[in-house]
Amino acid sequence: MSTTEVRQGDPVTTVLTWQVRPGREQEFEQWAHGVTQCARRFPGNEGVSWLRPEDGPRFHAVLRWSDPHRLAAWLESEERAAWHERIRGLATEIGSERQSTTGMETWFSLPGTTVQAPPRWKMVLTTFLGAFPFVLLIQWLVAPQTAAWPLPLRAAVFPVVLLPVLTYLVMPLLSRLLRLWLYPPPDR
């Protein structure tokens, strides 16, 4: 398992890869539907997507969870163990990769990733919702105090104040709050 640094409280995405015995793909797809429904009812689940990128017996499950603790609870649950017992001899889990995400990193197309960026209009609206209150505050509180400063210095105040606040506080919070709207499960 390849694991990036995961902080408690951060959303987490796990990709599980399954090797299915040739000719048993349809049985596996039925099992995948059932285990997906079970996982979606589990606390903290934010969606499950199945991918079959190549024509053959290999399947990938992309599981999104609200935090690492709830993901671990699912991975160690009796429900999951019971579902895995049902496919003994039918398929083998051959790998997994876990990654912590705030949502913002998927706004940029990165090679080798499976999570699609939200539509640009949703990114614009979310950014506007995050930036507008702070732009208003800067214009109201900071701009009058810096009116006598040279233009390049005044212009620097805006990004120096706004960008760290958006990057570290506002956008991760908005991405988490609007996660199901920004990244709807594929069955919606």
Image: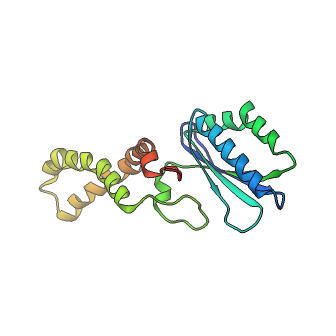
For the point 62% across and 34% down, which residue is it?
A: 69
17 left or right of 89 in image: left
Q: Is residue 77 visible?
A: no
Q: Tell me if residue 79 can be seen.
A: yes
Q: Nearer the viewer, residue 93 or 177?
A: 93
Q: Residue at x 81, y 45 (%)?
A: 87
Q: Residue at x 74, y 55 (%)?
A: 26
Is residue 97 toward the left or the right of residue 142 in the image?
right
- 148 versus 169 height, above or below: below
141 to 115, vertically: above or below: above
Toward the right, the furthest residue is 89
Question: Looking at the image, what colour scheme do you see?
Answer: rainbow
Determine whether, in the image, residue 127 is placed left or right of residue 18. left
Residue 14 screen position, x and y as percent:
64, 49
- Comparing 68 with 33, the one in front is 33
Q: Return the residue nearer the eye: 114 or 18.
A: 18
90 vs 67: above or below: below
Q: Quadrant of residue 178?
A: top left
- Quarter-of-image position of residue 154: bottom left
Asked if 53 appears above or below 173 in the picture, the reply is below
The x, y position of residue 110, in whole percent, is: 54, 65
